[in-house]
Amino acid sequence: MARIVHNYPVAPGCYRMGLSPGVDRVEPGQFVMIRIPGGLDPLLRRPFSVYNVLRGRGGGIEIVYKVVGRGTGMMASLGVGDEVDVLGPLGRGFPMPGKKERVVMVAGGVGVASLHLLAKRIGYGTLLFGGRNRRDARLAGDFRDLMEVKIVTEDGSMGRKGFVTEFVEEEIGEEGTVVYACGPSAMLEKVSCIAMDRGVRCYVSLEGMMACGMGVCLGCAVKADGAYRMVCSDGPVFRCDEIDWQGMDG
């Protein structure tokens, strides 16, 4: 059980929640499964990337989440001192870059949450963030002290206008770059295709419909390297060339 130390909006429909005490050592890209105790609706835990590790007495973690259904709606209504049931850290996280590799991160919307702890560990590079408008761009605010941030908004209200995938090719460059990406599957597929065409390492963090978080329920299976693998236990981070992207579309 973890106690909520803060829970406040950071962008339209998105919240930042701090939980204490902390979990065991967290690697960038890992996640936790959270359930609101005291009832059976919603019954299942929901996965959330670990956004940050809190220091100080008791330690803790932070998550950034978007309200998309009943469970996250209930989470948004919780206050300081309320408790949630936390399982984690779970999954396989991001590998660190090589000493001479240039780092490029690509994020779409709240997918940026899975990259923040990695950005803190690395401390350099470029984040290419895509959102609908300037309000969504608030999600990338914490990255400005860690690396160069380039914003793309669909309505052009901040940064460059368009979809983030339209600007990935010019940002990735050639060999010597490592790419880390998280966001919608269509975005990840496009980023992966560009990275493979350029011959650069690329790691993607996938989202999946998880119920257990430990590879037991088989609800988050994806086809990778010719076999079905679980996003929760084999991932959520995969090399981009492992994934059967056509299978993801189907």
Image (tube, grey):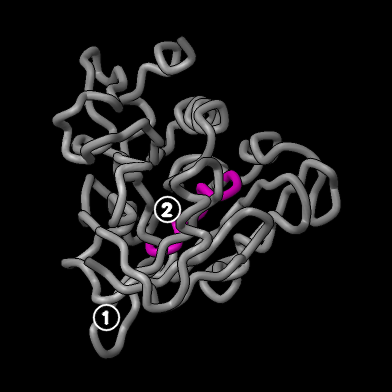
Q: Which residue matches tag 2?
A: 114
Q: Nearer the viewer, residue 56 or 3?
A: 3
Q: Quadrant of residue 218?
A: top left
Q: Which residue matches tag 1?
A: 59
Q: Is residue 151 left or right of residue 211?
A: right
Q: Quadrant of residue 86?
A: bottom left
Report the residue at 19% width, 27% height from top: 217
In the rendered image, residue 147, in percent from the top left (x then y), is placed at 55, 67
Q: Tell me if residue 54 comes above or below residue 75 in the rendering.
A: below
In the rendered image, residue 42, in percent from the top left (x then y), is placed at 37, 42
Disc 2 secondary structure class: helix
In the rendered image, residue 227, in percent from the top left (x then y), is placed at 21, 15
- Closer to the eye: label 1 or 2: 1
Q: Amino acid at mark 2?
A: Ser
Q: Tell me if residue 150 comes above or below residue 21 in the rendering.
A: above
Disc 1 secondary structure class: loop
Q: Nearer the viewer, residue 201 or 91?
A: 91
Q: Is residue 33 left or right of residue 120?
A: left
Q: Quadrant of the C terminus?
A: top left
**Looking at the rendered structure, which numbered label has been put on residue 189?**
none
Q: Main structural element of the magenta stretch: helix, strand or loop?
A: helix
